Amino acid sequence: MAATTKAAQEALRLAEDDPDRALALAAAVVRQARAEGDPGAAAVAERAWGLAAFHREDLDTAMRHLRRAITLGRSAGSATLAAEARMTLAFALNQRGRPRQALREIDVAIEHLGRVEGARARAQRGAILHQLGRLDEALACYRAALPVLRRANDLLWIQRVVLNRGVLHGQRYEFAAAESDLSEAARLCERLDLGLSLGYVHANLGYVHGLRGDVPVALDFFHRAQERIGALHAQLGPLLTDRSELLLSVRLLPEAREAAEQAVAEFEREGRRLALPEVRLLLARVAFLEGDHPAAERQARLAVREFDRQQRREWAALARLIVVRSELAGERRPRVSLRRVEGVVDAVARSHWPVAAIDGRLLVARLALERGRLPEASAQLERASRPRATGPALLRARAWYATALARLTAGNARGAARALRAGMAVLDEHGAALGATDLRAYAAGHRAELSELGLRVAFQDGRPRAILEWAELGRASHLRQRPVRPPDDAALAADLAQLRATVIEIDKARPRRPPAGLLQRQVALERRIRDHSRFGRGEPGPATARHLAVRELGADLGDRALLEYVRYDGDLYAVTVVGGRLRLHRLGPVARVRDLVDRIPFGLRRLARRSGTVAGRSGALALVRHAARGLDDALLAPLTEVGDRAIVIVPTAPLHAVPWSILPSCAGRPLSVTPSAALWQVASHRAARTRGG
């Protein structure tokens, strides 16, 4: 009998760390204990069986075996065994959505347990309260249980408590305390050889470091967690979802998509139907941002069906918007009904997705304008522009974009330009705050839209200076660095971490209307971060974020000439700055230049071959020379004011691949190539200070 009891205890030890092995062992022990007439060993084995089933998310099986464990504990005359089984049953009941019954069970268990066992039950009570969001009460339970467990050197339960408390500290933005507890939990897992538990600890450490903005460290912990959890065939879906969202937040789209695809596959394999459509929606969003609109539409349609089956109308509305956006981005655009899109957007607005609602109204407005339905477009733009004065920064920036489009539609180009600059100013002022989790995934795209519309307004106006300024703002949008480490300034880092956590809380509260206090906290944190960055010790933004100082540009260039190439409406243009004067040149279709650019690498590769024939090399050389002359005629010959000056070239796609030095007009001429004039200006100022100092 002693051997059977020992085997039952081993099954209980394995239940949390290796559920598959625990199930097999527990079943064997139950059979043996019944044969031996040992209800005590059977009670422990049934509890192990129930706990292992719980960790495999088979709650029906878990509760059935835990109730058997309670009955067997009573049959053995052991109030302790019955109470310990009741303690585990309470946690399963809470997972099933029966919190009141769970708390009743745990309170009964505490009454029948001794000092150490009672501490374990209090820790379990804390875990139940924790899941219910009653964080203060949960923390009090953890604090009451932990000293008793430490005095008893109950390492397994100490590990469980510090893990749970670490997660709780993270939810309360107490990141140093969270790291301390989770690090202790990791050490205990290694000491106790708890591989699966260590995987969960690493997953939580990754989540906390993600909140702190330390993306490389977070990804390292996620990787370690995935290796351990995957090796034990436990649930990887939630971890892969967190990984995808973190990668999306720093715009690593291929990696984010791979993680989202893996998460969908895991949730499908695990049969976790409730969580599946949200992860599928994440995959659809990433695919859309990658430009794979058919895949985005396919995943979003599946998500719509799954949300509809679950009667989650608000989430289904959001998924339908991605379906519509994907259709309109593809070949079926002419067949999409305006009334249908309006209905989808109205449903999104009713479901409390404010940024998505603005984007949807912009979509309807553009579609209405294409189809000549100006009143409907104007009505949608007016509604989308309302939040421009109050609320979170990203919402205000989108509203300013809608305002600009409304003014441009009404023929007020100057008013549109003012609105676009106001929207850009919001994004610039809150640049540090928009590094927060989900926000930074979209801020760059919104900045690019503002600059593209600004460039359109500038071309309609025809002033070279405005075209240069908006072209530079567009370049800054693409070159802007996304921070992957928290700033050195501790106060700024803490505020950013709190903002990330607040944004996550708001997202979790949707699609219900988030509590006003959360939204107020988000706005207050954004303002505090803005002010800290502006007046405090916050670190300056990257050089690419600087706006071009056009008035200083002539003096900065000296005897040099600036050539900034710009694409607009299928044509290539050049803005030149020579002797302080700006000029605009239309150079012709982009397609003609692209064809010439594509010939040069082909010819150079043939020239580089050692095995080529003399005739082949001669032909390749002629091809390169012909393309170089053609590019010279297209890109440089029309710019007669440049003369023989040294030149600073700011290319645009497809000119990034041009080997400028082989163009005839560049032979022997000093030249430099830069991604943006603003970046060159910053570098020239820095070089001047170095020479002067």
Image (tube, helix red, strand yellow):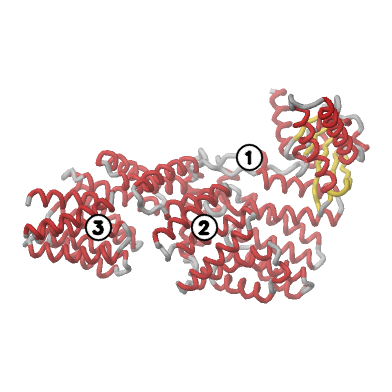
Cα–Cα span, label 2 and label 3: 40 Å
CB atoms at circles 2 and 3 under 8 Å apart? Answer: no
Instruction: Please report whichever mark, 1 or 3, sits nearer to the chain's N-terminal start.
Output: 3
CB atoms at circles 1 and 3 under 8 Å apart? Answer: no
Q: Nearer the viewer, residue 540 or 142?
A: 142
Foreground tag (1 vs 3) = 3
* Residue drawn at x 28%, y 49% as measured from the top left: 17
Residue count near mark 1 (Cα–Cα under 10 Å), binned few <14, some 14–19, many ≥20: few
- Residue 358's quadrant in the figure? bottom right
Instruction: Please report whichever mark, 1 or 2, sits nearer to the chain's N-terminal start.
Output: 2
**Picture coordinates of residue 682, whole percent (x, y):** 71, 35
Q: Secondary structure at mark 3?
A: helix
Instruction: Please report whichever mark, 2 or 3, sits nearer to the chain's N-terminal start.
Output: 3
Going by the numbered disc 1, the residue's amino acid type is: Pro
* Rendered view: 365 above or below 566: below
**Picture coordinates of residue 385, whole percent (x, y):** 67, 66
- Residue 619's quadrant in the figure? top right
On residue 542, which mark appears? 1
Q: Secondary structure at mark 2?
A: helix
**Residue with the mark numbered 2:** 522
Residue 261: tell me if it is visible: yes
Going by the numbered disc 2, the residue's amino acid type is: Gln
**Residue with the mark numbered 3:** 51
